Amino acid sequence: MNDPKIENMEEVRLMKGNEAIAHAAVRCGCDGYFGYPITPQSEIMETLMELEPWNTTGMVVLQAESETASINMVYGAAGCGKKSMTSSSSPGVSLMQEGISYLAGAELPCVIVNVMRGGPGLGTIQPSQADYFQSVKGGGHGDYKMITLAPASVQEMADLTVLAFDLAFKYRTPAMVLADGIIGQMMEKVVLPPYQPRMTEEEIIEKCPWATLGKPAGRKPNVITSLALLAEEMEEINLRLQGRYREIEKNEVRYEEFLCDDAEYLIVAFGIMARVCQKAVEVARSQGIKVGLLRPITLYPFPTNTICEYSHKTKGILTVEMNVGQMVEDVRLACCGRIPVEHFGRLGGIVPSPDEVLEALKTKIIKVN
């Protein structure tokens, strides 16, 4: 850690997606991780414990007594201007929703990782994409939104963790890395990001004017709260947040296109399903069917305008999700009824095959029997 030549060397490793998140957190200058184990994301905390970053970067790693405690520890650390994060899986994130809403209301940056499993209820430990509503729409109370990044590879598990911190601090808002259980558990080659130093107290004072650091000379003490007793004050806070969300929607939309230039039909999928659908697109093309794939990387902000443009030049869109149909609602809103938009998915942790996706495209969109 002390040799800058070693710190900045490109490191290539073979690791799980969960492990990549842990390594990225340490390397991007995270100050504190507070979490609680739950399958299929427990390796994040386990890897952090193995890395012992408190001996190298000074990062705190703590297993809290519950998910509720975890998110409130994040709340406290974020209020001090620290880079703080937590991770969980679907039912655990449900327990964090009140704290996430408080963080949004107090305009505090942090990162939450959700490695999705099947539900509702305790559900299954098998992978799912059924937390789209809970994450993208802001599962807690109030009119808030949360930057939501959807990795489709182990490499992106690392890259988007770094990006989540950057965007969270840029816009003073919680950011979520929303992965499915497959991406969390699968192993791939990863190029790890270079080390970034943790912010000093002087840098926090300069870059985080909201931070509660006692009362530095010449500076008023800050009070972190999401409470507004007057309706006019609460409206002002909400309008400020909505203005910030419009800036995020203007500047931070990210997506990937695959064989879309001449596409007559479009598949929209995120996470692991985008990789399955890419193979389905290749098979369809070999059969003379002009279909392309659009993969949202940011689920919020959603690539609404881009999908709207495709609704003017394609004949139909199929969304493929490992749920009963959640992202499909945003795709339909983007298309304004111009073209057919249908959904295909499997439930309970079953991953659709490329052949199943292609069959759904033929029967639901192209109408080929």
Image (tube, rainbow, N blue to C red):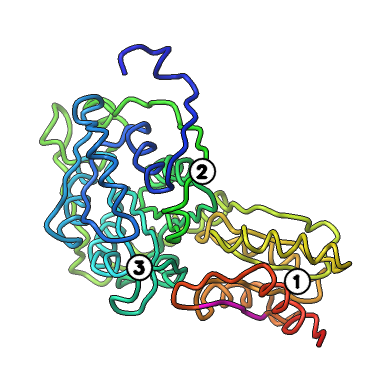
Which comes before the other along the chain, label 1 or label 2?
Answer: 2
Which comes before the other along the chain, label 2 or label 3?
Answer: 3
Looking at the magenta stretch, what is its main secondary structure?
A: strand
Amino acid marked by disc 3: Ile
Location of residue 362 in the rendering, given as x and y in whole percent from the top left corner: 77, 79
Establish if 295 lies above or below 79: below
Q: How many labels does the image show?
A: 3
Residue occupying the point 26% across, 60% down: 38
- Residue at label 2? 188
Residue occupying the point 81% across, 88% down: 369
Residue occupying the point 26% across, 56% down: 106
Give the spatial CA distance, label 1 vs label 2.
35 Å
Location of residue 35 in the rendering, given as x and y in whole percent from the top left corner: 22, 52
Amino acid marked by disc 2: Glu
Q: Which mark is residue 125?
A: 3
Amino acid marked by disc 1: Ser
- Residue at label 1? 311
What range is drawn magenta here?
Answer: 342-346
Residue occupying the point 14% across, 53% down: 64
Establish if 181 lies above or below 1: below
